[in-house]
Image: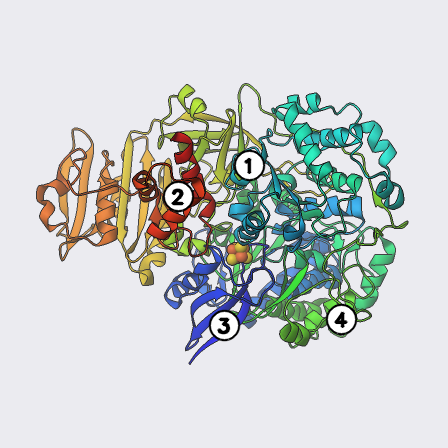
Amino acid sequence: MTREVKSTCPYCGVGCGLLVATHEDQITGVRGDPGHPANRGRLCSKGSTLHLTAARAVQLQTRLLEPRMRASRHADPAGPMRNVSWDEALDHVADRFAALIRDHGPDSVAFYISGQLLTEDYYVFNKLAKGLIGTNNVDTNSRLCMSSAVTGYKATLGADAPPACYDDIDHADCLFIAGSNTAWAHPVLFRRIEDAKAANPALKIVVVDPRRTATADCADLFIPILPGTDVALFNAMLHVLIWEDLVDTHYIAAHTCGFGALKTAVRDCTPAWAARICGIDERQVIAAARMFGESKAVLSLYCQGLNQSSAGTAKNAALIHLHLATGQIGRPGAGPFSLTGQPNAMGGREVGGMANLLSAHRDLDNAEHRAEVAKLWGIDDVPSKPGKTAVEMFDAIADGSIKAVWIACTNPAQSLPQQKRVHAALRRAELVVVQDAYKTIATMQHADVMLPATPWGEKDGTVTNSERRISRQHAAVPALGDSRDDWRIAVDFARRLEQRLTPERPSLFPYETVEQVWNEHRESTRGRDLDITGLSYARLETEGPQQWPCSDVSGMSVERLYTDGIYPTADGRARFVDVQYKAAVDAIDARFPLILNTGRLRDQWHGMSRTGTVPRLFAPEPEPALEMAAGDMDRRHLANGDLAYVTSRRGSQIVPVRANASMRSGQTFLAMHWGEEFLSGGAADGGGGHGVNALTSPAIDPVSKQPELKFAAIKVLRADLPWRFVAFAALASDELHERMQALRPLLRKFAFASFVPFGRERTGMLLRAANDGAPAPEIVAALDAAFGLDVPDVLRYDDRRRGCSRRMRVHDGKLIAVALTGEVAAEAWLRSYLESGRSVAALGRLLLAPGNKVPADFTARGRVVCNCIDVDEAAIVAAIGAAPTGITGGALFDRLQRALGCGTDCGSCVPEVKRLVAAAVSAA
Ligand code: SF4
């Protein structure tokens, strides 16, 4: 029977509502929920392909379907895992945890969890660590995402609560977007910005970003500051606001404190001073300040550019100062609005699921708060010693002070900075438990115990999006295999640990349903700033998603906060705090002269454990590339596609380079998604430490403890690797992922390797590798076997003198596998034939001809811009060229949409199509 189930998207913090179509216990489609206030029926390219990630054929290859244990990882790191029962796995882990806690104390164990977990999952893990075990060693990958937003809000506004809402975009007359490529990271929200601009052309948009991103393309004022210099810009804007009498003295006097000291502190922060630090024109500082101060309603949108910094708290506070100084807060269209990267980073904050927080926005260092939580949980005390935050936690595992770590729903062996150390830490740990839906993640190689968890589509609970809106997430299909919900696994383990540690006490985990967990969380919020006692699962079902607070006293969901100018501080006033510009920790110098910035791609999500199973999502970015300014490449004698050693003070990774006209000289960019599952290379240290985070910095903000993932000093040197290899094979979706997983260990045999799936109707896997010299024969044989080229009917061309070879298999006139060694330029047309399934029968000797003789009828495709309709850049440029002369930008864009269909489905590509149109108009 076909049916539709309401749920939410598991990717970004926009929190779009979904209608999930199922047929006979399988997910068959998704569409945006028209009734969900976050997206009103829209989805982006990631959300709209969720059903492809959930296809049964894919899931059966990528999912962990039963608990597994390894006999002895330390004696035999590559030793086999064996399937075990849940009882055996959880009893074993409970025995080991209990023994470590007895012998070494509660702080010898740790939990590293995730902003992808549902609120209920988070709640149980937090209670397990802090309530049962007595350690605050529970932290989350949200530490990498938004902990500076938390500390920024708390320092200035008194509580961790984004005061604005999505509807404020429609009410603002100035949007101030800083450190956020909203167009790619929060695409459906960006559709709202486009709508607001269309409805109100007078809406001013200021974008502050080191890169000219797709978001910057829509800006009335774009300020390309140097990475890490945001505080200097914001302080100088405050200087201008004060100097030009654009501050709201009444609001400051009535609702804030500390302004006098800050006014003195920013006296010397002149536009000229900021311009020097930020690498911009001082007129841009003045213009931004005037737009901010003269607008009736300013809404700031900001994200990882502010948060992922050793000055993250200061950056957040300095921006919030601008709102407090101008009274731009607590009104429709006005306020500082941090966008959360992950789908439920907010839920984790609400339950206090981090090393320095407690339930319902309580603080660990507040004795009264600890006593309240202890009373709620029915225990004597909650430990006061702060736990280890993400980077600190893996340092403590590396030095042996944390001996067991439980990792749930996250992939630290890809996502944390200083990967070499993270892998070393996991190798050293006495016990590593990995609870995840996917067996393909890099962290699994370190697991002693693997616990299969249900992913999106199979689990039930709640999430909170960036605007404080709580939505229900429903299971659309039953759990696959023996996998269980994350909260259930944590409860099953907790009860076993109680039998070993506190057998005399009634269980702290009496829950039989996920709703019971949520009800306990709800009670913990009573009287707090995020009071949700007026909500229930039933109300969320009948009335739809609701924003917090929503107490049982008012019964009303609150759209925006601080409308009365009263803040959750002791005196009810917001705070101006001391924020001074400090340079990034990982300084550039003569040895490391370039800055590495990281961020998202439009169509990928985090470490790609889910989006990486949809070949078409690689079409816009089919391989990793370090983006650089063309001049910086010229100086290094690098051309597009050349390989280069990218080296920071922590590690080195070989990556292809690519010129990007949006990059300023001295800056580079590599997407955050490329971990060792897709980008690898030689491992001199014996394993681990690949991908973008081999390079990134573990420097942390002193308050938020968030690592500085967006600033690493690097050098880039040409990599001359004479042995080049490209192989690709057509593989149906029911075998593609298993074949890719089997081949992954080989990636480390090469100095460079990138490995991705590709295709739409006809899919396959693509390996590009390079080396100092030809690899050992057994590796060549393994590659042949992996690509199905180890059979007698392979067509061959070999030129041993030149080190070139070409091997391929043709079946029924169609290419099904190709391997090129030495000369690899023929990849483009050969892969086009393989992917399209066109017959190669008429090509004859051309198939094996040396060099790169291209078939006469071959037309190279460009980078895919519109992934929904499959429109590439070459087609768009050609259509622009064919348009009548004199046609204007808007009309040209409309014409393209009619002719090609690009941007007419999810709309995620609209900014890029507009960029191509603008470039053509400008050239004309
Ligand atoms: Fe998902 Fe895209 Fe919506 Fe984010 S914007 S929640 S990724 S559909």
Determine whether 621 is above or below 730 in the image.
above
Q: Earlier in the sequence, mark 4 or mark 2?
A: 4
Q: Which residue is mark 2?
A: 892
Badge 3 local density, few (<14 within 10 Å), some, or many (20+)? some
Disc 4 is placed on an element classified as loop
Q: Amino acid at mark 2?
A: Leu
Q: Which residue is mark 4?
A: 534
Judged left or right of residue 156, residue 593 is left
Front tag of 1 and 4: 4
Mark 4 and mark 2: Cα distance apart in space:
51 Å
Are the residues at dot 3 and dot 2 in contact (C-beta closer than 8 Å)? no
Mark 3 and mark 4: Cα distance apart in space:
31 Å
- Tell which of 393 and 897 is nearer to you: 897
Determine whether 479 is above or below 268 in the image.
below
Q: Which mark is residue 85?
A: none
Disc 3 is placed on an element classified as loop
- Tell which of 10 and 37 is nearer to you: 37
Determine whether 280 is above or below 578 in the image.
above
Disc 1 is placed on an element classified as loop
Mark 1 and mark 4: Cα distance apart in space:
44 Å
Q: Which residue is mark 3?
A: 479
Mark 1 and mark 3: Cα distance apart in space:
37 Å
Q: Is mark 4 within 8 Å of ligand 1?
A: no
Q: Amino acid at mark 4?
A: Gly
Q: Which residue is mark 1?
A: 696
Badge 4 local density, few (<14 within 10 Å), some, or many (20+)? some
Q: Is residue 499 visible?
A: no
Q: Earlier in the sequence, mark 3 or mark 4?
A: 3
